[in-house]
Image: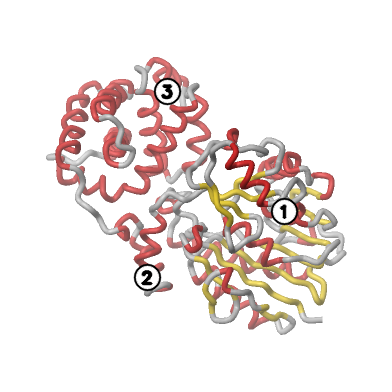
Amino acid sequence: MSKQADLSVSNAAPGAATRMLAARVLAQVFTRGRSLKAELNWALPKLADTRDRALLEALCFAVLRRRSTYDAALASWMQKPLSARDADLRTLLMVGFAQLDVLELPAHAALSATVDAARALGRERQAGLVNAILRRAQREGFAPQPPRDAFPAWLADSIEADWPGQADAIFAASLQPAPLWLRVNRQQGDRAQTLAALAAVGIEAEPSPVSADAVRLAASTPVNQLPGFAEGALSVQDLSAQCAADALAPPAGARVLDACAAPGGKSAHLLERDPSLRLLALDIDARRLARVKDTFTRTGVGAEAQVRAADASDPRSWWDGTPFDAILLDAPCSATGIIRRQPDVMFHRRAEDIDVLVGIQARLLEACWTMLRPGGVLVYATCSILRAENVDQVQAFLKWHADSTADALDDGFGMDCAGVGRQRLPGDDGGDGFFYARLLKNA
């Protein structure tokens, strides 16, 4: 954004800057296909108060989840549709809706700050319109919309085709806020000690019966308020992501490759469970590897791991030829299983992306298989719920590799998928949508 944009933020009335920034972030997501994370990385530092930062994030997530409802309201209430040039005005109105509809902020304060934000955006002439529309929203509320309508048609159709009996539940669960899951670092204490430490500071939590290191908080809590977080005793990681370590379960001292390691949570989890592992955390993006190193340092596992920037699909450019005993391939995917955490996926993902991703996944699988020793294990995982990326991908791999066998995983990993893997759908056991396949390389 420009210096002029920064100046308008600093000159905005109290409360207006947060609404204005939310409108700008959402306009970038909706009109330019930008990622919410990237836009928030720009916007959040412009707000000094942590409460304003939290409100900015809450507004953006609420609008993303309720966009179809707000679109319908605007279509009904506005005599003349807003043009493409009015993207920031449209998103500002939605920000106003979210304050009344989801966050349930005091109406007077919400309306006043949003009208001030319109002026700060240079929309002085439309300030009266913003006020009138928000007052109507306050009086009439919003007509309910089917959760399916929040999804682009191609994605909704794909989900219904892949999961005809569960599609409605997937749509609904994907639009709900995700719980906060923590991973307990076994090198610093056990889960019972962690639960006691959380209870001692008034944080309600419960263990998961699915994964031995997982703790679910009853309410979202800033990480700086979690006892032991700064020291690495706890990490934020969804239940489904934690289960990847359970699926791989490498033997003690094994040579392990985490082929797409950033941001490093799964590698750290493996090392927290067994520091004797000879683990290489690999990622194609050197910038993202900085986060891996930070994760290793905070959790205290850095001394046991190697970190390298390289393309796992091109072993000839970096691999020394020594095979790995176990490989975790958490492959790039559509992220359709984590929409509740990244609702912008619904707006920047395209139908044509799936074929491209399937090709990338197939190349990664092929390359990783060449680096696995006979008798070794490879876990292929995605945070997708689309069969093309999951069961179809693994079935095709098994068909063309006579030395491969799908090893059974139990019900704790989700529902069975044609005997080649397991799928957890969004909200199952409180976790994200995730697929796991455990493949053995025949000796």
**Amino acid at dot 3:** Ala
Which mark, residue 160?
A: 2
> Which residue is at a point 58% across and 69% down the rendered structure image?
412
Q: Is residue 205 above or below residue 41?
A: below
**Amino acid at dot 2:** Glu
Residue 118 pos. (x, y %): 28, 25
Q: Is residue 156 above or below residue 29?
A: below
On the rendered structure, is 343 left or right of 409? left
Q: Is residue 170 above or below residue 309?
A: below
> Which residue is at a point 17% across and 32% down the rendered structure image?
135
Label located before the other in sequence (3 or 1): 3
- Say what secondary structure mark 1 lies in: helix
Residue 28 pos. (x, y %): 41, 39
Label located before the other in sequence (3 or 2): 3
How many residues crowd mark 3 within 10 Å: few (<14), some (14–19), many (20+)? some
- Say what secondary structure mark 2 lies in: helix
Residue denoted by label 3: 5
CA distance separating discs 3 and 2: 42 Å
Pick the residue in front: 151 or 312.
151
**Given this view, does label 3 or label 2 mark the residue nearer the observer?**
2
CA distance separating discs 3 and 1: 40 Å
**Amino acid at dot 1:** Ser
On the rendered structure, is 319 left or right of 69? right
> Which residue is at a point 69% across and 61% down the rendered structure image?
245
Residue denoted by label 1: 267
How many residues crowd mark 2 within 10 Å: few (<14), some (14–19), many (20+)? some
